[in-house]
Amino acid sequence: MNFALSEQQQMLQSTVAAALAAGFPPQRLHSLINRRADDGAHTEFDGLELWGLPIDPKYGGAGLEMIDAALVAECVGFAAAAVPIVNHWLVAFALSHASDRDIAAKWLPQLATGKLRGTVALAEGESRWLPDDWTLRGDGGTLNGEKWFVGDVAPNGLIVVGLAGGELGLVLPDASGIGTKVLDGVDRTRSMARLRFTATPFVPLGCVADGAVRLVDAALILTAADAFGGARRLLEMTTAYLGQREQFGMRLVQFQAIKHQLANIALEVEPCRALYWYAAHAFDHRRDECSASAALAKAHICDRFLQMSRDCIELHGGIGFTWDYDAQIWLKRAMFDATIYGSARRHRERYARLVGW
Amino acid sequence: MDLAYSRDYEIFRSEVRAFLRQYWAGPNRDRAKRAEEARVFREAAIEAGYLYRSVPKIYGGSEQVVDILKGQIIREEFERVRAPREVDGVGVTLLLPTLLEHGTAEQKACFIPRTVTGEFVWAQGYSEPSAGSDLASLRTRAELKDGRWTINGQKIWSSGAHLARYMFMLARTETAAAKHAGISYLLVDLKQPGIDVRPLKQMTGGAEFCEVFFNDAWTPADWIVGERAKGWRVSRSTLKHERNFIGGVDRIAKPFERLVGLAKQARLGDAPAIEDAEIRQRLARIAGSVAALTYSSYRQTSLAARGEDPGLIQLLFKLYGSNVGHEIAQCARELMGDSFLLAPIADGARSDGIEKWNQQFMGSIAVAIAGGASNIQRNIIAERGLGLPRSVN
Ligand SMILES: Cc1cc2nc3c(=O)[nH]c(=O)nc-3n(C[C@H](O)[C@H](O)[C@H](O)COP(=O)(O)OP(=O)(O)OC[C@H]3O[C@@H](n4cnc5c(N)ncnc54)[C@H](O)[C@@H]3O)c2cc1C
């Protein structure tokens, strides 16, 4: 019985945190949200060779678990780093479940090196995020229809597409008939597009059993981890700012009203760490609890992140409400996390059903 | 990360189970017999090394090597069959650790063995009418004269003092010293003419805490724990235990389980309340907090087992638990319907017994006050957890 991080895991988090801090300093984040030219590079992060982290070593990956992926996602959330790693891993999770082993053997090694990138196209708008909601049909080996809010679409990358009946399909690099419309997302640290498929060829993944559910569980857990990281960052930023801002001849952190507000925020944020850890751990080791834990963690943590980000901006005063101050970056990440893959309400209802209420 | 126990621990678990099968048949239907059965059972459990593991054998404990995971297994297994664990009350949860840390050999020998068996029942005498959160401003005086302490003053809110034989208390022994520096930690026999214990009726209807008046009461000179004037430090180690104790996950997880039970039992319209969309949302929202607290305690336990400091989270348990208690109360109130009108243990209560939830509705407020009120917890989190300066108010 050991529910704490190993030395390797602590090391993983500290190296990833350092690489992301170096690669995505605030100036760069602001230049991203101002849509200034950005080469999209993440050299320090690339140097860590994490693209294959959850991929089976027989396909050239590191064979680590969901908890390790989630620890990295926490760092990404903390840094608000524009690295397309989570969507890439989701493709890896989906392909690992493909019943057609040739697909895994063909594509996973390329995903593991990061030379080939992947993303997932699940949502169809109007809150249709989950397998039961999907309506896109893959008749006759081609796709016709739309997918919304697709992140990190790479030229010549793989796209895992959610299909009617909770099936998954794989769109291969260079596939024809894909129209991409970039969406103006509220969170500009993450790219987002609407994809229109017109007679686009695809390969059915033929996932074993609950492949689409596993994919969604993974997405929920990694989003929860991202939200925890973001909340940690905002709390740290707010505590530091109020520690040096003076009013009434004193530093604001000397006022008890401020201290209590910060204590209340810490109270809501810190326990979320173990909540996402548990869901991630369950993904690999307690499968019967995984979907419920993932739904609960996503709902709870993203809710907390959204509320605390409002509180933190309020605590900053006017500076917090400006475009050029850092806080807004994380408020918008909180807005993104709260919405992507379905609302807290939706996942709480799923939780209730999954635990048999 | 591994939530399973290793083979050695699973062997230990099966030993605990075998012990329980042999010595514990379940709580006796006849309430009158329960106390005696619990006493006999505890003796066997101490002998087997399962209770009072940190208490030396000479003082009636089982003196085991510290092993947090074994402790956890014992709690789980005893809980599963509802076997008695250590005796309830502040004598065991608060005084015992303090005596082990600061007591003299004589004090330990005199008090620990019979506290462990439950023979000595204790009350905590800290709060005073004008010293609550600002405990160090307490005024009850103890003077050393003729080889004994003479005590004058008043304590208040002392839980169970009317049923207790002894009290551990804080008293001012040095009048000239600064606030925190003038306090000593004393043990007192409550059964004496100079002490008047008057139960105060609580809002729930029971009389569980008391006022205690000291009028030239006395206690032997050597019934002081730790050095003279060092009582504040001695008492702080006690409060630390209290924070963990009240924040215990069981105290939240159990009422939540019962709340889900209530939602299944209660009806909204024509259907069980648990089928109502809004109630399901509320329950799931609380479930998120309960799960976060539970898994945080796994993390705390694991880090403690490794000898590492879990940090901020330790300071959060009390306030987090109090807040979840409030949420449970609010949800329960909605589920109770008209039963909310009835006294918790009313004469002629309705047969479904739902009105007993009024006990939780009120009791959860006490949790937020006793053992350091919520605002004081916020001060602690801000100052010790987030490193913010002490307040200017
Ligand atoms: C059921 C129950 C059992 C108890 N059992 C015992 C017992 O066995 N032994 C014992 O000694 N005591 C016991 N107590 C007393 C308990 O420890 C005190 O009630 C508690 O410490 C608060 O003190 P107070 O009641 O004087 O409130 P006060 O200290 O007067 O506080 C009133 C309010 O002001 C707030 N407040 C106080 N100071 C500050 C500050 N600096 N900043 C912001 N807000 C502040 C508090 O949060 C509280 O909400 C018990 C209390 C209860 C309710």
Image (cartoon, grey):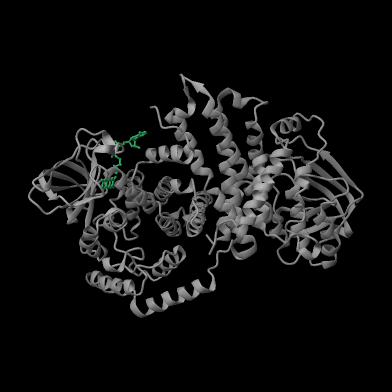
In the image, taking residue A173 as reference, residue B90 lies left or right, namely: left
Q: How many marks?
A: 0
* Spot occupied by residue A64 in the image (x, y as percentages of width and height): 70, 60
Q: Is residue A237 above or below residue A101?
A: above
Q: Nearer the viewer, residue B113 or B336?
A: B113
- Res A102 quadrant in image: bottom right
Q: Please tell me which residue is depicted at 59% across the width and 58% down the height of the picture.
A: A292
Q: Nearer the viewer, residue B330 or A21?
A: A21
Figure quadrant, ligand 1: top left
* Spot occupied by residue A334 in the image (x, y as percentages of width and height): 63, 39
Q: Quadrant of the N terminus of chain B?
A: bottom right
Determine if residue A128 is in view: yes
* Spot occupied by residue B118 in the image (x, y as percentages of width and height): 24, 64
Q: Nearer the viewer, residue A227 or B31?
A: A227
Q: Quadrant of the C terminus of chain B?
A: top left
Q: Is residue B340 above or below residue B106?
A: above
Q: Please tell me which residue is depicted at 34% across the width and 49% down the height of the picture.
A: B237
Q: Please tell me which residue is depicted at 27% across the width and 68% down the height of the picture.
A: B58
Determine if residue A309 is in view: no
* Spot occupied by residue A260 in the image (x, y as percentages of width and height): 45, 35
In the image, taking residue B175 as reference, residue B277 lies left or right, namely: right
Residue closest to the far top: A248
Q: Is residue B393 above or below residue A279?
A: above
